[in-house]
Image: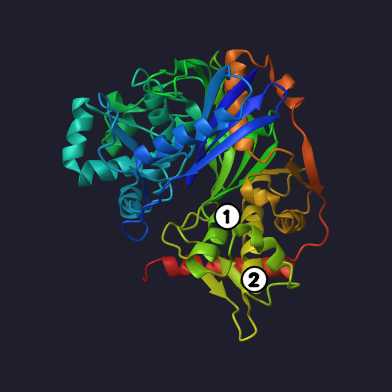
């Protein structure tokens, strides 16, 4: 038996067919357009996401030996999507998790004293990152659209909800706790939408999706809508929780970092809701069909792999992202260059939405190789900041995954900075693998988490050698300059 897993990411959709021994049998990928209508604004056309989903799934299925038994979904989180309940057409572009347009709204709510109560209920912070602030902005700035939401004609959801609506031809309007817990509308204690928060952000609860477990019978694809397939949708999770599951981080204290557009560090908290005093978020990792929830502590770093993409696309110093390792290895260090890649603000543990990128230490001797190496070091420093805040020291081992984890230099720099081993899996598509594992559990392809552990394989373990503490101190000083510059003059 096999599982079709869909990973609807920030820049494209990956689809994989995973066999019952944990191997990826086939794969498809399709990018979609990014829209930046104003500085700090990021939008996606939902129809583009749907068409990329169809194309990537068709490609993956064409390489599979047999039809899959079920389908699982994982997705970019926090992005606000709206669609017509009848036609399933989106009346406007989605507001993406990276979008910072609601910074002023967050300031107003913070100054009005709402943040402590919001954090108490949700485990999150008041930040433009989360879905509810985006919905509040739409309610305020697009009243015609919001009339449709309030009348019940327009549905609200995150990308998972939108894809399930499209795949089921509108029969299902659902989400799961891992995605719901990223909206600022879900209560960690109650496990449900919070009327108090819906009222605060002006979001009608009737427009929100039903919250269902992360695996089990969640819906069924409509053959006329989804490539002629009639399959159970039996697993869904936000991308970072799916990666935690795909890395088989099933034990309390397991820590993983996914190196993608941003980097996201999560540690398994088990069934206890733990609060952070260090700028970290408490979130739902997954919920079983019986209702048992596992929680996670998360550090969200907004720009890591995206910084390498910026070097390629914005500055033209790289032909491809894959060249970064070889070029960085041509110099022994950064030559004093420090890069703080706050291209869309700073996330954990600093939480400064108005921070902007900073490069210091440039001299006449600075080359593009120094800048590339400084970018890789910045990623390692950012993750070190979060892991130390999360573990009050270092984790026994960091389980790495994601596209940038193939960079051996970055993984060695990370091990050196943490002073702890970094393990990279043989299968890099860990996020999609997590969606497959959830769906397979929900449909009986696998019978237990113990079976899933047996499918996991190690590619390489990076042992710590020597940390560059001087470089890290320069990095911390540069972050201080960045955050200071973001604050208004008194």
| In this view, 282 is above or below 107 | above
Query: In the drawing, does residue 3 fall left or right of residue 41?
Result: right
In 3D space, how far apart are the residues under numbered discs 1 and 2 (Cα atoms)?
A: 21 Å
Asked if residue 348 can be seen in this view, the reply is: yes
| In this view, 146 is above or below 106 | above
Mark 1 or 2: in front is: 1
Residue 62 place in picture, x, y as percent: 56, 29
Query: In the drawing, does residue 254 fall left or right of residue 479?
Result: right
Q: Which residue is mark 2?
A: 474
Q: Secondary structure at mark 2?
A: helix
Classify 10 Å Cα crowding around label 1: few (below 14), some (14-19), many (20 and above).
Answer: many
| In this view, 56 is above or below 44 | above
Question: In this orientation, which residue lies closer to the viewer: 325 or 124?
Answer: 325
Residue 320 place in picture, x, y as percent: 59, 60
Residue at screen point 76% across, 53% down:
415
Residue at screen point 63% across, 32% down:
26
Residue 177 place in picture, x, y as percent: 48, 27
Q: Earlier in the sequence, mark 1 or mark 2?
A: 1
Q: Which residue is mark 1?
A: 305
């Amino acid at each position: 038996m096999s599982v079709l897993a869909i990973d609807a990411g920030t820049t494209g959709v990956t689809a994989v067919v995973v066999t019952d021994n944990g191997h990826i049998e086939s794969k498809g990928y399709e990018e979609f357009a990014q829209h930046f209508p104003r500085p700090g604004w990021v939008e996606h056309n939902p129809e583009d996401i749907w068409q990329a989903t169809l194309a990537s799934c068709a490609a993956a299925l064409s390489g599979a030996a047999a039809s899959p038994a079920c389908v699982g979904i994982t997705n970019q989180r926090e992005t606000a999507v709206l669609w017509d309940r009848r036609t399933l057409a989106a009346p406007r572009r989605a507001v993406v998790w990276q979008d910072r347009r609601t910074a002023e709204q967050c300031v107003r709510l913070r100054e009005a004293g709402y943040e402590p109560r919001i954090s108490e209920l949700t485990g999150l912070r008041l930040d433009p990152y989360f879905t509810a602030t985006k919905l509040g902005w739409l309610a305020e700035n697009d009243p015609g659209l919001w009339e449709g939401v309030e009348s019940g004609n327009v549905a609200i959801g995150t990308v998972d909800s939108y894809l399930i609506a499209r795949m089921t031809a509108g029969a299902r309007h659902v989400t799961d706790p891992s995605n719901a817990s990223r909206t600022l509308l879900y209560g960690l204690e109650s496990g449900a939408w919070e009327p108090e928060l819906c009222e605060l952000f002006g979001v009608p609860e009737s427009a929100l999706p039903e919250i269902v477990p992360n695996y089990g019978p969640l819906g069924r694809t409509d053959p006329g809508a989804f490539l002629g397939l009639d399959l159970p949708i039996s697993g869904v999770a936000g991308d970072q929780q799916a990666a935690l599951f795909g890395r088989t981080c099933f034990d309390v204290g397991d820590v993983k970092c996914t190196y993608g557009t941003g980097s996201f560090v999560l540690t398994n908290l088990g069934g206890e809701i733990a609060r952070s005093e260090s700028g970290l978020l408490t979130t739902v990792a997954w919920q079983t069909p019986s209702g048992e929830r596992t929680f996670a502590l998360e550090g969200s770093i907004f720009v890591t792999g995206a910084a390498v993409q910026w070097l390629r696309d914005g500055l033209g110093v790289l032909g491809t992202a894959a060249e970064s390792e070889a070029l960085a290895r041509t110099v022994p260090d950064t030559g004093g260059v420090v890069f703080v890649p706050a291209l869309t603000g700073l996330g954990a543990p600093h939480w400064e939405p108005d921070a902007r990128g900073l490069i210091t230490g440039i001299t006449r001797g600075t080359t593009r190789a120094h800048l590339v190496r400084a970018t890789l070091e910045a990623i390692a420093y950012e993750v070190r900041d979060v892991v130390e805040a999360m573990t009050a020291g270092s984790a026994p081992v960091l389980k790495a995954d994601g596209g940038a984890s193939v960079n051996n230099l970055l993984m060695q720099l990370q091990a050196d900075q943490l002073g702890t081993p970094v393990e990279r899996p043989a299968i890099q598509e860990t996020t999609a693998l997590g969606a497959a594992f959830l769906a397979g559990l929900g449909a009986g392809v696998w019978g237990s988490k113990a079976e899933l552990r047996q499918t996991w394989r190690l590619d390489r373990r990076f042992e710590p050698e020597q940390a560059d503490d001087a470089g890290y101190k320069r990095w911390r000083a540069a972050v201080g300059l960045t955050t200071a510059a973001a604050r208004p003059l008194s």
